Image: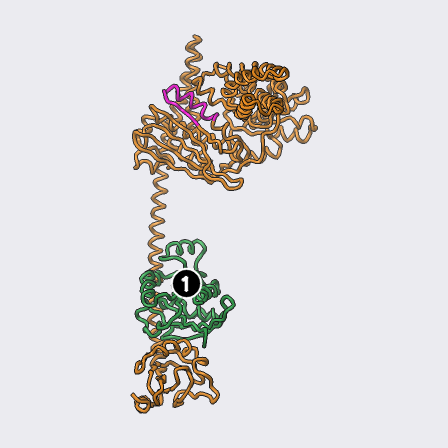
Amino acid sequence: MGNSKKVILLGNFGVGKTSLVRQYVFRKFSDDYMTTIGVRIDKKMVAVNGQEVSMIIWDVAGESTHQKIPNSYKLGAHGIIYVIDVLRPSTYLSIEKEISSLEDLLPNVPIVKVANKIDLLTEKERIEIVNNLPLNDYVLCSAKNGSNVEDAFNKLAESLI
Amino acid sequence: MKLQDFKSKFLQSWVQFVLMDEKGNLMETCNTLFSFPENYGNLFDEIPFLDSISQTLADLKLGAEVAYPCINVELLDFKGFCDYVFYKIDYNNQHRILWILMNFSDHYTHLIDLQQQRNESVIQKELLEIEKKNAILAGELLKYKNEELKRIQKLKTAFFSKVSHEIRTPINGILGIAQLLRENKDPETVEEYAGIIFETSKHLSTIVNDVLDLSKIESDKISFEKISFDIRSVVSAVTAAFVYLGKEKGIQVISNVWDNVPKLIVGDQVRISQILYNLLSNSLKFTKEGKISLDVQVHSIQGDQIEIRFEIKDTGIGISAENLARIFEPYEQATADTTRNYGGTGLGLHIVQQLIKRQNGSIDVASEPDKGTTFTFVIPFEISAAEPSKVTDDTSINRNLKILVGEDNPLNQKILTEFIKKWGFRHETVDNGHGVITKLGQSAFDLIILDYKMPEMDGLETLQFMRANFGEEINAIPVILFTGELDQAILDKFNKLNVRSVLNKPIEPKLLLDTIAKIFYNEPRVSHFDLHYAIEMTDGNKMLIHDMIDIFITTMPEEFQKMKELLAHGDLAALRKAVHKVKPNFHYMGIRKARKILDLLEKDLDSGKHKAQLPTKINSLQQITEAAIERLKVEKLNWVN
């Protein structure tokens, strides 16, 4: 116990939350889509500014809105990673509303927005899509090739200290 | 509820209870799903899930519960899905946490399959929708492109029919007048007919140049030079022509280059002139009264990179907002009336826009009907590190230039030789490369002017022969080449053969003289003076300007002689008067460098300070004046009526 932080991964189903955790914790990736039900918990120790932090990551089954997720999952969360799929507008069309509702439910809890699957875009498409995303300050990630995955979790870890 | 009640309620094979204290120390369990080893440590330390909810459990009120459904559990030797419920209870007067684990693995495993199918189907549907939308967009884009292509094709057809009319009309006119000229010997009528032919040819030349420029732009064959040039000279030279033309219409044409614009910049002087000429000519065409101004200033500067902003503003007929959007499109004019009333091919502004765009610049237009139009364009340049080099040759060499002309077309021969004579140079003319080779073996020349396309031996073959067979002395003679098809490939060919300058046909005498002066002075001809003020002051009166230059050239050496004598005698009061007397002359000739020294001299003479520096300042002034005089001697030739 001690410096443990509960981090929950939220976002629509199929956006790659489980893949991000697998890449971050185990450095593994599989192209097969295996849906998550309920929640799966993993743990990773990270050093932030010379301080050791135990990130207990709750990989929560994807839903179109966090309101469909049991409140107990969110209770006591220290940080949130909200994941979208850059290829599916349905995963980010309501992101403004979702983030705002999460901020109301969990005031002062940092939220990192992650745009996943950028490996599937060309540079031109990436610029075009990113420019049209609602909100800004996304971490552009690829769970498949690991690009920026560590950065996304580290960004959240830094804000937890 | 007491622990015993919980036990009796939940004690089933698929349920396990774990009793722990508030710090996570294990107290009791029933071992139905898994067994804790004997030395198992603190539950909060051992089980990450419990660690992450330890604060929630601490905050739980006595008698309250918190439930976590569907937890994917891998704990000790148990693997499956459980629902967790945590109760805070009173056990022997101590607060305890009772953790109930209910194994629903079968139920949840079955759910996974259903959920997987549902999610995959939704995702597939979404991706299909996106593909459909993309296909619709691609179809619309294709449709738009086809329509645009059709529209351009239609405009091109209309344009070529218009251009063929525009070209045929002046050609027929020229032929008709030429026929009349042959039949009429009356000097006044001949003069009048020659004037008509000249004006009509100029108009025809504009149309042909526009069409050729557009064709080059569209085939991406246009190239841009990167050479150091004096932007003030370009502005001054372009404006001078319009001051004169404007005066005839009663329109004032003025230009201003801000002081912070560097003297020399690196870019394509000819293309900048072309853009300015086009925009000013457009303004002049559409302005009936008022004025036209050209303002040049620094837009941004970073290191040796500079963006220069050019603004051309007129008080003309203006353009409506609706038509403004179309004016840069090729083959378009603001309205059909514009073509009827003002003529033109509708290509000028498109060419201007493309020339600017291809130099990484941008152009904007703002206009209000009946108020006027403002074109603003910004082009990036490099600031030139080169300063104008000192004059090495004196004017007497220049005026005694002997030029060998290789040109087969009798009309071009006539034009070239007439102007060469007018400028005071000597020449010999031949009509093919063989003639050039023969002449070069017979006498010495200072300059060779060659036509690219000549019979028997063309310009290229002539140069190749010269480079291969003649010695250093002949190959050091500068060569100016004329061609009807100026493109990068031709430029590259002749650059390899060390041609000093390649000029486009038709022959432009002023440009040729500029080029000659540049070769022999090794810098732009007008960089040491600016006649803009003189042109404005005299309303462009050529003779008057010629005389002003002449007076400056002849009187200034005497004035310096006088100043030096006064300085030697220590008569500073008279020297002050002499300096004051010559000051306006420098102003008329636009010799800016000299004006600064004159101001300092006057100040020193008034205050009586820095007397020791007076000879240095007068010498500097004299050097600047002499350098300007050398160039003015050539410039003067342009102002002969």
Residue at screen point 41% across, 67% down: A16
User: Could you say which is closer to the camera, residue A76 or residue A12?
Assistant: A76
Q: Amino acid at mark 1?
A: Val
**Mark 1: which secondary structure?**
strand
Residue at screen point 36% across, 59% down: B131
Residue B249 is a magenta residue: yes
Q: Is residue B190 above or below residue B490?
A: above
Q: Is residue A63 above or below residue B175?
A: below
User: Could you say which is closer to the camera, residue B177 or residue B292?
Assistant: B292
Residue B501 seen in this snapshot: yes
Residue B406 seen in this snapshot: no
Q: Residue furthest top?
A: B186
Residue B297, horizontal then vertical, whole percent: 45, 34
Q: Is residue B184 above or below residue B144?
A: above
Which SS type dominates the magenta stretch?
helix
Q: Is residue A135 above or below residue A13?
A: above
Image mark 1: chain:
A
Q: Is residue B466 left or right of residue A111?
A: right
Chain B: colour as depicted: orange
The mark tally for this picture is 1
User: Could you say which is closer to the camera, residue A65 or residue B190?
Assistant: A65
Which quarter shows the N terminus of chain B? Answer: bottom left
Q: Is residue A11 left or right of residue B258?
A: left
Residue B160, horizontal then vertical, whole percent: 38, 32
Point out the stretch of residues depicted in magenta. B236-255
Chain A: colour as depicted: green
User: Could you say which is closer to the camera, residue B564 or residue B538?
Assistant: B564
Residue B395, horizontal then vertical, whole percent: 61, 19
Q: Which residue is mark 1?
A: A114
Residue A13 is a magenta residue: no
Q: Residue furthest front?
A: B608
